[in-house]
Amino acid sequence: MIRELFSCVLDQAKAKGLLSSERFWVDGTLIRARASHKSFVPKDGAPPPSSGSRGNPEVYFEGQKRTKDTHRSKTDPDAKLATKSAKAGTIPAYMGHVLTENRNGPVVDTRLTQANGTTEREAAIEMLAQLPGEACKTVAADKAYDGEAFVEDCRAIKVRPHVAQNISGRSSRINNARRATRDIRSASSLASSSRPCSVPPSCRASCPR
């Protein structure tokens, strides 16, 4: 039902000329699960000590390291402990993904996945691969998508990635300096760019001029 409504809205936007078939933006965010930290118990072994009421006990995690591999929520087993920043604490969450048309801003596709270190890039490739049309496309993304596999997967489906470099305590996976300078351009710059697509060779004939 929701997908049908979403498709109808997109059809109206397309009829009014508000949808580009070539330029897109992808992003992901954490969506908090309906689970609490204290619902996470070891997958193997005894649960942590607790006290207080049975319905809402005080749970003590002192000295315990909790990870996605070692703990699972009793109330929402599919939720994962995740964080979007090394400076932020973890929360029980899922990952939401949005693919947006870059010129006028309408959302053209969405996904909801479990939260782990690769789902942002995997969901982006899945959404991009399902875009209609054979013409070469471009996608802008933030530094969370700076991964060699994402860049190569984009090119394999005739999508030119414009990805901001992630150089926070690591080297960028975009190892070509000229390409990195090009790929870090903002979404607004992408929307007005008329430079033809340069990768891969099989894509060039159908790239927008």
Image (tube, rainbow, N blue to C red):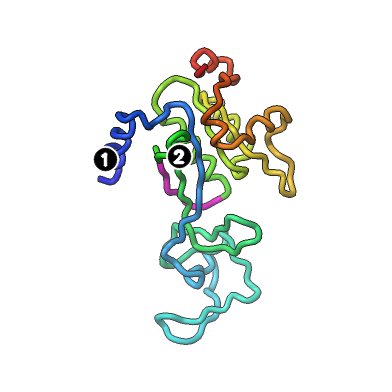
Q: Specify whether residue 111 is painted magenta.
A: yes
Q: Specify whether residue 114 is painted magenta.
A: yes
> Which residue occupies 30% across, 29% down?
15
Residue 35, horizontal then vertical, whole percent: 44, 66
Q: Name which residue type carries label 2.
A: Leu
Residue 29 — which label? none
Residue 207, horizontal then vertical, whole percent: 51, 18
Few, some or many C-alpha atoms within 10 Å of disc 2 (few <14, some 14-19, many ≥20)?
many
In the rendered view, tell whether residue 81 sits above or below residue 101: below
Question: Can you identify the residue that label 2 sits on?
Answer: 99
Range of residues picked out in magenta: 109-116
Looking at this view, is 74 or 93 the one in front?
A: 93
Q: CA distance from mark 2 to mark 1?
A: 17 Å
In the rendered view, tell whether residue 131 sits above or below residue 90: above
Residue 103, horizontal then vertical, whole percent: 46, 33
Question: Can you identify the residue that label 1 sits on?
Answer: 4
Q: At numbered mark 1, what does the secondary structure look like: helix, strand or loop?
A: helix
Quadrant housing residue 68: bottom right
Q: Name which residue type carries label 1.
A: Glu
Question: Which circle's residue, 2 or 1, is located before the other in the chain?
Answer: 1
Q: Are marks 2 and 1 in contact (CB under 8 Å)?
A: no
In the rendered view, tell whether residue 140 sits above or below residue 67: above
